[in-house]
Amino acid sequence: MLFSLNPRAVSIVTIGCLLLGGCLSARPWYEKELKAWEGAPVSELEANWGPPRRTIIGKSGRPVMVYESTVVRDEQEDVKRDPNQLLSDRPPSARPQVDELDCSMYFEIENDVVVGVRHEGAGCTVIPRPGKSPGS
């Protein structure tokens, strides 16, 4: 036998993997919807989204159009709607947990075309790009 496995080392590695796996989560669906706007003319973006909340200059020196949204999330309703979520056998709390989730979406512009998109926050309200969004 060339090597033997130390049970304690195996336990530590296993716990580490589980913890790391818990921190890694799937990206939200709206990242794909945002990415679909890359390559869109600014006129199409504004026709669908309206005027931006503000325009800033990005690190690259290009203009960045900023859109913002806020979503109110009722945790109990989310559990009921999500078919992958297991319902709890605990009685519902007297006061449901409600969160306000803020999101800023950034559209980087070059030559009147969207060349990059990103977001900060959660609960983004994304307007799908007609004919270009995933699943359309």
Image (spheres, rainbow, N blue to C red):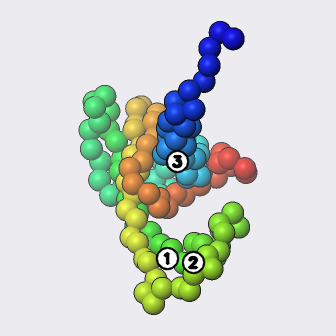
Q: Secondary structure at mark 1?
A: strand
Q: Position of residue 117 (x, y in %)?
A: 45, 41
Q: Residue at x 56, y 27 (%)?
A: 6
Q: Choose between 34 and 75: the one closer to the eye.
A: 75
Mark 1 → mark 3, Cα distance in angstroms: 23 Å
Q: Residue at x 37, y 62 (%)?
A: 102
Q: Is any atom of residue 38 visible in this view?
A: no
Q: Classify residue 14 by image quadrant.
A: top right
| Mark 1: amino acid | Asp
Q: Position of residue 46 (x, y in %)?
A: 46, 53
**Residue position for label 3:** 22
Q: Are marks 3 and 2 in contact (CB under 8 Å)?
A: no
Q: Choose between 56 and 19: the one closer to the eye.
A: 19
Quick one: label 3 or label 2, which is nearer the N terminus?
3
Q: Residue at x 29, y 48 (%)?
A: 55
**Residue position for label 2:** 77
Q: Are marks 1 and 2 in contact (CB under 8 Å)?
A: yes
| Mark 2: amino acid | Glu
Mark 3 → mark 2, Cα distance in angstroms: 23 Å
Asked if 65 appears above or below 122 in the picture, the reply is above
Q: Residue at x 40, y 37 (%)?
A: 109
Q: Position of residue 31 (x, y in %)?
A: 54, 47
Query: Label for residue 74?
Result: 1
Q: Position of residue 100 (x, y in %)?
A: 39, 70
**Residue 25 appears left or right of 85:** left
